[in-house]
Image (cartoon, helix red, strand yellow):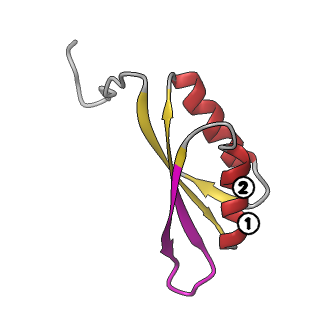
């Protein structure tokens, strides 16, 4: 493939793989409950991330194994659409 300045070559992701989500909200307990609810039927790891400089926002990092792009996208959408989540990366 020939790349020019306008073409972005996306990295190829081989599945299954471990994938991480950074979930941002305003309440640590609510974010933990959200992650537990969405990841209920899978093995996952969760750890506290950063707190914003004024303390309004907190991030949590959740990791799990995903078997496909579709599964990864479904989890991302579930986090993104959850009422306790302000942003997911």
Considering only vertical position in the picture, is 86 above or below 55?
above
Magenta stretch prevailing secondary structure: strand
Q: What residue is pinned by disc 2?
A: 34
Q: Secondary structure at mark 1?
A: helix
Number of marks in the image? 2
Q: Position of residue 22 (x, y in %)?
A: 51, 55
**At x 20% / y 15%, what residue is drawn?**
2
Q: Nearer the viewer, residue 70 or 42?
A: 42
For residue 30, which numbered disc appears in the image? 1
Q: Residue at x 52, y 77 (%)?
A: 51
* Cβ atoms at labels 1 and 2 below 8 Å apart: yes
Between residue 89 and residue 39, name the one nearer to us.
Answer: 39
Q: Quadrant of the N terminus?
A: top left
Res 31 quadrant in image: bottom right
Residues in magenta?
Answer: 45-61
Does residue 89 sit above or below 12 in this rendering? below
36 in relation to 54, above or below = above
Q: Position of residue 60 (x, y in %)?
A: 54, 62
Whether residue 53 appears in magenta in the rendering, the answer is yes
Horizontal and vertical percent for residue 4?
23, 24
Q: Residue at x 61, y 37 (%)?
A: 42
Q: CA distance from mark 1 to mark 2?
A: 6 Å
């Amino acid at each position: 493939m020939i790349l020019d300045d306008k073409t972005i070559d996306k990295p190829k992701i081989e599945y299954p793989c471990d994938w991480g989500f950074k979930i941002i909200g305003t309440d640590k307990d609510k974010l933990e409950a959200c992650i537990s609810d969405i990841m209920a039927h899978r093995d996952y790891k969760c750890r506290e991330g950063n707190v914003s400089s004024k303390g309004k926002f907190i991030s949590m990092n959740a990791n799990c194994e995903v078997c496909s792009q579709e599964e990864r996208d479904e989890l991302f959408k579930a986090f993104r659409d959850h009422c306790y989540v302000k942003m997911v990366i």
